[in-house]
Structure formats: structure tokens, C-alpha cells
Amino acid sequence: MPTLYQKLQNIVSKKYISDSLIVRHAYSRNVDPVLQGVPDIVIRPKDAKEISEILKVANQENIPITPRGGGDCEFGGSKPIGNGGIVLDMKRMDNVVHLDEDNLIVTVESGISWGKLNEYLCHFGLYTGCMGPGSGMTASVGGGISHHSVGGGGCAKYGACTNQLVSLEVVLPTGEIIETGSQANRFSKYPFNRFGNGPDLAGLFCGDNGIMGVKTKISLQVFPKPPFANYKTFLMPRKSEQVSGKIYSEIRQKGIEVYDAMYLMDLIVRLGCQEGLYPMWDRLKKKRAIFFYTVEANSEAELDEKVNQLDKIIEGKKCEYLGPEISDGNMAKWHYTEQGHWQFYHNLWGMFPVFEPLTAECSTTIELFPKILQDIEQWDMEHSEDMNKIMEITKFRPISGSGPIILSKGNVIGLSCGFNSFGSYYDGKLHEIIDEINLKLWKSLLERVSKWGVMWYMMGDLMSRVMVDIGAYPAEYYNFMKSMKLTLDPKCILSRGKFNFWGNS
């Protein structure tokens, strides 16, 4: 009787499977310093057919499978929950399948990164609109669809990357392969529309965090990059959180189309300048919060009109324009013209080299985000005793707050809040108490922020289970989601444990 490993090797060949301890540990973590799950096997399939066969074997053996794209997730989403199981690495599936220039739709394999896809599209004068998550150079398109990703640029104009989804090819947890949208009609040659041919089944796999199926091909609407753009950066006055909220609200109320608008709180600017991360702002006498915007247009007249309207709003709030060049402090120009959107998004994280993120990244409304930030300050003070225990070891206190606060579609804000801390291995010694405190604090903050009614678009291991554990989901909603999961995946093979869907294991 062939072993599990032999059955899987027969599907992909021995070059694309490993049970080496080194490889398994390399796939046991994502971005955070706390969550770890060491798989038994790592496998790299080449197409939907191989994935289908792998899932069939996993069902026969009752072995859980965790899909992994770029591995950039922040809540432990692309590693097992606990040890064991199979990690399904999608990196071999990174090709552009077809570009339909007439209908402006690109079809790709789901393991391709947002960086590679947009590099390809730029040769045709196109882009994906929302450029994916802030980690988009390496984050996969499949992961972006699984998380409703935002943050990599363009989300004020285009919203989350799932807004531009046209169709999916998905391998269901028991091995069946389906296509959605226009491709639900088997006579359709190329994808052209998401809605029709019955219910929008693609929506079941958007934001599913990998529990409902394995995305293998993804078709996205793409857009011509406008020939004109402008980008301005402003130093903000005091009470910048409230001021930025008023600016965001007025932009939306006046219907001004912006490509990006971002607010960086005082803490980011002050500590970043202190650590030499922002040489463009060295000349600033007052290291206060920053606000910037980017607009695109098809003519100079259209561009000038947008800029004039925006400047009237922003300068009317006593914000100070820093100048047109990057050397003047114009982060917006660097962000748009030099792909800065994929180099600084979570700047709160990398402020000190030893810091690691415990994120509470979510979406909320323009109205609520200043209140949430104030509450996080209160939370920080309430947990000073635990923070100080870490400081006794590291000589530096964890920092809470938020990275860039970005305008998304409509009145939605992307809030990259959370706190930075230290890993348990510090200064040549293992301090297990740091992990214990980090996890305690992280769960506490996630519960606190959840109770503001935010939307968690990226949930993974930790956040999906916190929502269930604190009773955030109404029973009717959770039971409906569970019934869909068990219908598609009776043994909970796929991403076992997320949302506390453990099956009969």
C-alpha cells in the first residue's frame, strides 16, 4: 500500500514535494512572530488537475491542506493551525494565461504575484486598478482575492482587488473543478463578465480565506493607465486624526475621484525621522502627521480641476504643502512614480529592525477611525503592565498605533492598526514569556477593535477564530457559513481550523 507521501509524489514528481525538516520549518510561519504550524509535507502543483488529485488523496487520508500564495498574510493564514498536514504552495502557477486587450481582461494563474502581473501589464499601458495588498511585490493574486486585499495603491479609486474580479477557476475541497461567471457557460471561449448564468458563485470564494476552494485561475478587469497624474503631500496641523477624517469626508461628499489618499499619524513621522527612515522630511522643523493624495486624469484640464478642488479642501484645513519634488518631502510622488506603494505600506512595522508586527488591520468608516485610534491609545495604557514586562527584557517598549490610514472605495478606510513587539528569541536567548504576552495582548486588541464593528477582510488562523470565540458572528450567520463549508468540504480538509471549522478530526 503506497504511503501518503508516495501517493502525492506520483502526482507532482519528486522534484516538487518535500518532507525535509528544513523545508517544513520554512513554511511554518507567515509575517507575525507568534503563530507557527509545521506541516508534514510541502507540495508544489502545476495546475488545477494536479490540485484536484492532491485533494482527493487528502480526503481519502483525512489529511488537512493549507493553500499558500506569497505567504505575506498577517494572521497565520497560509500555514497549518498547529502542526501537521500539507502546505499547498502555489508558486509554480505564476503565468499570465491570456490578455484580452479588446475587453480589457487578463487571466492569470493564481500563484502569480501582483508585482509580476503589473510589470507584464505596464508594457501594454495597463494596470490592475487596485494593485493588491501593500506587500504586492510578492503577494499572490490568489491570496489577494482570498482576502479582499487593499493597500498596494489605487484602492481609493478602484476599491479592493475583488471589485475587479471577472471569473474564477476553482478546485473544490473534494476535487471537483468549476468555473464561475461567464465561464459557467461551457461554450464561452474567454471570460467577459462576472454576473449571470445564475447566482454569483465567485463571491463564495472572495474573502473566504482559503476555506471554500483552491483558486487556480483568476480573470480580472484591467484598466488603461491615464496619461496625466499629480501627487501632493501636506504637513498636517494639530488634531490630525480628526482633520484627516474631515478631509476624507469632504472628498467623498464632493465626489472628487482620487487614485490614492493616505494619512500617516504623528507617531509614524516622528519615530521614522528619528530612525532615519524619511530623509525627505529631515528639514521639517515640526515632525507632525502627513497627508498625501494622488489623482489621475485623461487631460490636463481634468487633472487641474481635480487638483484645485482637493487643494481647496486640504489647505482650508490649515495643512502645509511641502513642494512638488521628492526632495521637498513629496512622498506622494515617490509612492506613485517609484512604486513606493509596495515599499512602505506597513512602515510602523519596520521602524526598528528587531520589531515584528501583531496587526489588527481592518476596514471601517471615515467617521469611526479617529475614535478607534483614540481607543487603541487607551488600550495601550490599560496594558502597560504587560508591555513593561517585555521592556524589562528588551529595554524597549512595544509600540501600538497604525501605519498608513488609506481611503478605499466609498466611505471606507483601510486601518492598518496593531502593535509592534519583539520575538521570543532576543539577544541570543529564548524568552518564552514574550510569546505568551504577545499572544495575550494580540487577542485582547483584536477583541477590542472588533467591538467597534470593523470588517476583517484578512482573517487567517487567528482572526477567524477570535471572531467566533467572542461571539461576533450572529448564530444564524455562522451556522449558514458552517453549512456551506460542510457541504463543500465534509471533512474540513481545506484550511482546517479556520473559523473553528475542525470537522471530525
Image (cartoon, rainbow, N blue to C red):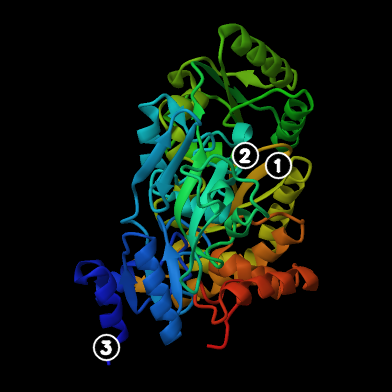
Dot 3 surroundings within 10 Å: few (below 14), some, or many (20 or more)?
few
In percent of width and height, residue 218 lies at: 47, 49
Q: Nearer the viewer, mark 2 or mark 3?
A: 3
Q: Nearer the viewer, mark 2 or mark 1?
A: 2
On screen, residue 394 versus residue 362, left or right, reads left
Q: Are marks 2 and 1 in contact (CB under 8 Å)?
A: yes
Secondary structure under tag 1 reads strand
Dot 2 surroundings within 10 Å: few (below 14), some, or many (20 or more)?
many
Between 357 and 304, the residue placed more toward the observer is 304
Going by the numbered disc 1, the residue's amino acid type is Val
Question: What is the spatial separation of the Cα atoms under label 3 and label 1, in whole angstroms?
Answer: 52 Å
Residue in the picture at 43% in, 50% down: 139
- The circle on residue 412 is 1
Q: Are marks 2 and 3 in contact (CB under 8 Å)?
A: no
In percent of width and height, residue 200 lies at: 65, 53
Q: Is residue 255 above or below residue 47?
A: above
Residue labelled with disc 3: 2
Between 182 and 253, the residue placed more toward the observer is 182
Residue labelled with disc 2: 159
Question: What is the spatial separation of the Cα atoms under label 2 and label 3, in whole angstroms?
Answer: 48 Å
Q: Earlier in the sequence, mark 3 or mark 1?
A: 3
Secondary structure under tag 3 reads loop
In percent of width and height, residue 138 lies at: 38, 48
Q: Is residue 250 above or below residue 34?
A: above
